[in-house]
Image: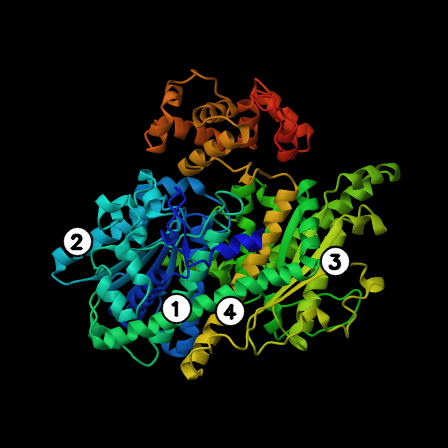
Amino acid sequence: ALAACDAEMWAEAHADDDGVGDASAHPGLSHPTVVADIARLALAVSRCVASDTPETPAAVLVVGCGTSGRLAFQCARAAERSRKAERGTNDRRKKQAIFRHVIAGGDAALFQSAESCEDDRERGASDFRKAVAVYEPYQIKRVVVVGISCGLSAPYVSSFLAEAGRWRQELSRREGEKTRVARFALGFNPRRDAPPRGGFRELFPNTDDFGTEEFGTKSARVCVSGTTRERDKRSRVVDEENEVLFINPVLGPELVAGSSRLKGGSATKIILDAAFAVAATVGEGRGTGHERGGSSSYDATAMTFRDEAELYATRALSAFAAATRKTHASMSRDGACASACARAGAAVAAGGDVRLVSVAEFADVADVTPRVSKKETLSVSPLNETLGVTVSALVDASEQRPTFGTPLEKYRAFGGGGWRTLMYGSDDETGEEQRTRRKANVPPRGCFEVSWDAYVRDAEAKAADGGKKRKKARVSERKAEGKRTAPTFLLVLFAPGAGARAARQRIAARRAIALERAKHADRGGDDADEHLSFAFLCVRADASEPKTPPWDEDADGFFDVEAFFFSADAVFVDLVDETAFVADETPDKTHAAFLARLAPRVAELGAKLCLNAISVAAHALSGKTFAGRMIDVRVSNAKLYHRAARVVAAAAGTDVLSAREALWRACGFDHGSNDASSSLDVSEDEQKNDKVERSVVDAVVARASSLSSVVPIAVLLARGAFREARDARDALAEAGNDVRATLSRVQRPNNTREQ
């Protein structure tokens, strides 16, 4: 089902969902107009990077909330590291990064959800000012701002984009010099469906036409065919200095309704990675040549650059499309991935732990000597790297609490050198604060540690704590104590490698497995292993990497069950396509460099798809979805309040007004107990137009943020199964917090059961 859902992402166009039979009403990710928009973003980024000097710095700011902000971090981080690696030591004059992320809530929100910040317009504006202020005393002369909001609904992001426009106008009036600012908005809902509260309607250049979808018109459909120059003549001219360019492909519905971390997250990563890779490719060897074409108009030379940008954007999308297909094919080819999903689901259902631990960084650690011993230890200096696959795991783990209500400590990811190697430039602290924090390798304020060393310390502490308890317990109590130990699922992420690169990763993997077994030693022997499960994941995307997974080199007895007492589900995804991109011409040096530049991003996408599949399946199997919806979503901002009301209405078979009242009661309020509750009687049409009294939303969000299972309880109340929220909560607890099982046993108001 997930494979079929992701395949929809690559359709060229999607039929309108209002019943109009025009198959080209909405452009898909591979639509020519979307490809042209990605190329336009790439050229803007290329011009921006080419103009950067110590005295006139440039910046590419990628901003988002929640999942979008985390992907902004991952993509901006990868682009900046790639840029610095390609320039080598010549770029040490630069203290500030060109590519930088901004996430609502600051860096503490990267791997711990902070959804309430999404509604903060004032903070969005102030964070833009803070982002450009770090370059003082120098004045930025060129900025590219990319705002990401999958549903075009985040006020923080729209405010950030709007403030960028105001800032440019202020500088132009004050200094008499033109500061170039290119603004792009990335989202995947049709623009006409953008909620007014999100603020994106004000950013569209022709606000009167916002409610109509231009891709469904005859004048827009003519752009589908013809050469680049012909399309340019027919399409509307974009004023990059004064308008926000919307990159707005429609992807189709998510497998889990509202979970934009799936297709929406994948498309975000694909578009940003493609644009940044294209920008680096078309800018090679040209210096500031793009300036000949100006910033918002193109002469013959600039048009050539645009043709080239569109060509490479098409190639990049083709690579990502092939990777999507091959990843899903690999996951379905054998039972390893399905078994991993089932094991992870069993751990989640039993209230156990899921640990995503990356050992990929050990591939290049030179001071580790592989040794074969049952009692071997791994003693290394702190890791000086955090790879993209590790970042993918960190992002995936951070999504489980806001999506499924999973406690933070139950679904964690670790790997690499931690915050010291993760961060490349943050807007959340002053330069001195950031340097001090990075030197001490401590996380941002309010955030937990994520390094390999942090995982080892955490596991050793839990194992030691369990050992102390066992010493105090009587023999007759040990069995009962063991039963209270929750199961654990450990997924170990590898990097492709052979020889010493593979051996070092195997040593680290054995260390992680030994630590997990030590935590469950109170069960003793085989009983401990029955409550532990392991899986391995490795993604290959570079033809220079070995074709066999690192755990296949069995010279050191890695899979010797008698020696190490474990077995694991091994998932190896090979995304290398020797024939990629060569259908239209013979590859040249620039083409080869483009492939090499894109390969790590392709591997990250493959890892993301695998991790998404495991986390979605695990929570679905444990009853965290109902009728294709996130039934235990956290109500922590206005967007999620409205989403929760729709979920309750659909699951309970009632209207939105009754669903809103049920949410109010699920939070412990009585109808009429607060003046704000009078707003519950606002009509559904007014709610759709965002005219619900803000006091209701604020009251529910404030209370729900500190409660668990608010949405499931609201469904039980809306169905009429219980009169009081506490009774519904007790029933849910008796069912082991299996939301779907509880709801399936409850009669609808019309006395029919959910099929």
Which mark is on residue 514? 3
Between residue 409 and residue 472, name the one nearer to us: 409
Query: What is the secondary structure assignment of the residue under circle 1?
Result: helix
Quick one: which residue is furthest to the right in this view?
476
Labelled pair 1, 3 in contact (Cβ < 8 Å): no
Quick one: which residue is furthest to the top in this view?
672
Between residue 60 and residue 436, name the one nearer to us: 60
Q: Earlier in the sequence, mark 2 or mark 1?
A: 2
Which mark is on residue 313? 1
Q: Earlier in the sequence, mark 3 or mark 4?
A: 3
Mark 3 to mark 2 CA distance (whole Å): 60 Å
| Front disc: 1 or 4 | 1
Relative to 321, 506 lies left or right: right
Tag 1: amino acid: Ala
* Residue bearing the label numbered 2: 170
Q: Does 593 appear above or below 267?
A: below
Q: Is residue 357 visible?
A: yes
Find residue 297 and report its horizontal and vertical position in percent.
Answer: 20, 67
Other residues around mark 3 within 10 Å, as few (<14) / some (14–19) / many (≥20)? some
Query: What is the secondary structure assignment of the residue under circle 4?
Result: helix
Find residue 260 and report its horizontal and vertical position in percent.
Answer: 47, 48
What residue is drawn where x is 61% and y is 71%?
Answer: 496
What residue is drawn where x is 35% and y is 42%?
Answer: 193
